[in-house]
Image: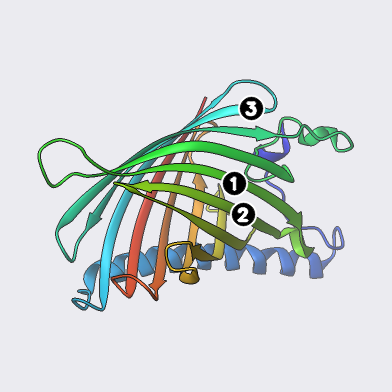
């Protein structure tokens, strides 16, 4: 059985009452974070957005990962963005190549889950964004993706995750680039017998159209393992825009992930 599939309770001092209390506290913390995110999602759907200043989007998404070798895999993405405030819809489809480095010193990580256990991996890809309100698919943006993700272990089995990404954007006749820096923290826990990874992250955006850091995004969610091949990830995000509208954007997302 690999490390990803194990249920690993914390043991600071094996067999001691202190270790058991810490373990129970961490499990409650993970469960509380998961329930908090779910509560925020349902609360957000029940509260109308303020027109002009704040808008709300609902984003269902499907991801598929196809392993090509020990160090490469394909990543397919499709999502629908439904703006509940303006009653509009946009779509996104994308194909990407993920590349990782096989660990040399820590051999047990060779078969590990890339997102959760390996220390470094890269992604290159292409995405097409289109408006779905007219007849057919109205292409609005061609986007090239280059990103690198690094992970570092923290005390008490938390992980620090840092992602650097560049979006190369061609919108109608204009080309621009967007630089993104995202920092997050996560920890794998067991909630009601299910392996769950609650997380929180913050991201800043630099847009060459404005020559400024013009956007921030804050997100919390949880990846929930259903089977070896299937996972789901509900999340809530808040996006702040200084140079574009809307100024405030609330995003409720739900991702279905499959691994092959």
The residue that disc 2 covers is: 164
Q: CA distance from mark 1 to mark 3?
A: 15 Å
- Left or right for 151, reference 64: right
Give above or below for 46 relative to 162.
below
Who's the residue at 77% across and 62% down the image? 154
Q: Residue furthest top?
A: 68
Estimate the x, y position of residue 62 in percent, counting from the top left: 38, 39
Residue 50's image quarter? bottom left
Q: Name the mark on residue 111.
A: none
The reply to whether discs 3 and 2 touch (Cβ–Cβ < 8 Å) is: no
Mark 2: secondary structure: strand
The reply to whether discs 1 and 2 touch (Cβ–Cβ < 8 Å) is: yes
Name the foreground residue: 24 vs 91: 91
Closer to the chain start, of discs 1 and 2, is: 1
Q: CA distance from mark 3 to mark 2?
A: 19 Å
Residue 12's image quarter? bottom right
The residue that disc 1 covers is: 147
The residue that disc 3 covers is: 72
Q: CA distance from mark 1 to mark 2?
A: 6 Å
Q: Residue furthest left?
A: 135
Q: Residue furthest front?
A: 173
- Left or right for 229, reference 148: left
Estimate the x, y position of residue 124 in percent, counting from the top left: 56, 37
Give above or below for 232 relative to 154.
above
Mark 1: secondary structure: strand
Mark 3: secondary structure: strand
Give above or below for 113 relative to 50.
above
Q: Residue furthest right?
A: 105
The reply to whether discs 1 and 3 touch (Cβ–Cβ < 8 Å) is: no
Quarter of the rendering occupied by the N terminus: top right
């Amino acid at each position: 059985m690999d490390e990803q599939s194990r249920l690993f309770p914390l043991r600071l001092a094996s067999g001691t009452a202190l270790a058991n209390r810490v373990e129970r506290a961490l499990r409650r913390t993970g469960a509380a974070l998961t329930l908090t995110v779910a509560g925020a999602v349902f609360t957000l759907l029940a509260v109308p957005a303020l027109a002009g200043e704040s808008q709300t989007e609902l984003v269902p998404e499907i991801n598929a990962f196809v392993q090509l070798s020990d160090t490469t895999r394909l990543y397919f993405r499709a999502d629908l963005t439904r703006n509940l405030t303006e009653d509009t819809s946009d779509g996104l489809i994308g194909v990407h190549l993920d590349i990782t480095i096989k660990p040399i010193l820590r051999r047990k990580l060779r078969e590990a889950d890339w997102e959760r256990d390996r220390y470094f991996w890269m992604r290159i890809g292409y995405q097409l964004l289109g408006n779905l309100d007219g007849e057919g698919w109205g292409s609005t943006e061609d986007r090239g993706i280059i990103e690198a993700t690094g992970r570092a272990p923290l005390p008490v089995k938390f992980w620090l995750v840092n992602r650097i990404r560049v979006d190369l954007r061609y919108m109608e006749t204009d080309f621009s680039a967007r630089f993104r820096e995202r920092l997050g923290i996560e920890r794998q826990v067991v909630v009601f017998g299910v392996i769950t990874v609650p997380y929180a992250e913050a991201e800043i955006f630099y847009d060459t159209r404005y020559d400024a850091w013009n956007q921030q995004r804050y997100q919390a969610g949880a990846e929930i393992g259903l089977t070896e091949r299937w996972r789901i990830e509900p999340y809530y995000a808040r996006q702040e825009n200084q140079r574009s509208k809307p100024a405030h954007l609330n995003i409720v997302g739900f991702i279905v992930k499959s691994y092959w």
